[in-house]
Image (cartoon, rainbow, N blue to C red):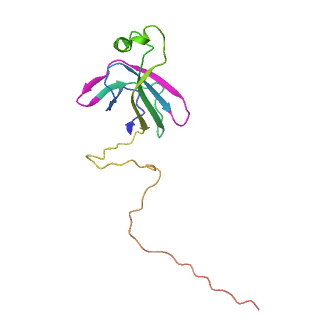
């Protein structure tokens, strides 16, 4: 799962894809609203086994929402996928709906600091809504009423 924030600045995403390419399309679907937004990525780089790219999300991601992410090479775009046209010569004559899946995953959007590796910071669903009482005072008040006799 990829953790992103509600930032309006570009956010960097690193994935281990099925195939490596520097130009592809990224679909991001909000699970709550079922709205899909497509982004064209043209500046991905390969670093070791990771495919790394940056993207600015518009509309901005919503706090505590889950998203589905789908990276794919769409063979209908001539200029951005020229190398794929050379590999698949049957596409030269017809315009096909061929897509090569590169990567699929989930995104969770939160502004909480989550660093389980170094600081052991975990996501807290009720952060800021509930405060724990740290006092260890066991004093309590007992109210005792004497029953009156009814004759």
Residue at the front extreme? 90
User: Residue 91 versus residue 53: which sits nearer the camera?
Assistant: 91
User: Residue 143 versus residue 72: which sits nearer the camera?
Assistant: 72
Q: Quadrant of residue 136?
A: bottom left
Which part of the image, by quadrant, shows the N terminus?
Answer: top left
Callout count: 0
Q: Residue at 55% across / 32% down in the picture?
A: 34
Q: x%, y% of residue 142?
A: 53, 78
Q: Residue at 41% across / 49% down in the picture?
A: 124
| Residue 51 falls within the magenta-colored stretch | no
Q: x%, y% of residue 89?
A: 39, 11
Q: x%, y% of residue 131?
A: 43, 56
| Residue 40 falls within the magenta-colored stretch | yes
From the viewer's perspective, is 118 left or right of 9?
left
Q: Residue at 38% across / 12% down in the picture?
A: 85
Q: Is residue 103 above or below residue 98?
A: below
Q: Residue at 36% across / 49% down in the picture?
A: 122
Q: Quadrant of residue 103?
A: top left
Residue at the right extreme? 151
Q: Is residue 115 above or below residue 70?
A: below
Q: x%, y% of residue 61?
A: 46, 32
Which residues make up the magenta segment?
Answer: 30-50
Q: Is residue 28 above or below residue 2?
A: above
């Amino acid at each position: 799962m990829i953790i992103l924030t509600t930032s309006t600045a570009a956010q960097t995403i690193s994935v281990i894809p099925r195939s490596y390419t520097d130009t592809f399309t990224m679909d991001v679907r909000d699970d709550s609203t079922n709205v899909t937004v497509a982004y064209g990525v043209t500046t991905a780089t390969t670093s070791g086994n990771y495919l790394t790219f940056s993207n600015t999300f518009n509309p901005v991601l919503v706090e505590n929402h889950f998203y589905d992410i789908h990276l794919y090479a769409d063979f209908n775009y001539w200029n951005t996928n020229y190398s794929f046209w050379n590999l698949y010569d049957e596409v030269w004559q017809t315009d096909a709906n061929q897509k090569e899946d590169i990567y699929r995953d989930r995104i969770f959007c939160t502004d909480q600091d989550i660093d389980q590796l170094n600081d052991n910071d975990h996501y807290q669903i009720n952060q800021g809504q509930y405060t724990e009482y740290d006092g260890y005072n066991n004093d309590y008040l007992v109210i005792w009423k004497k029953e009156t006799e009814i004759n």
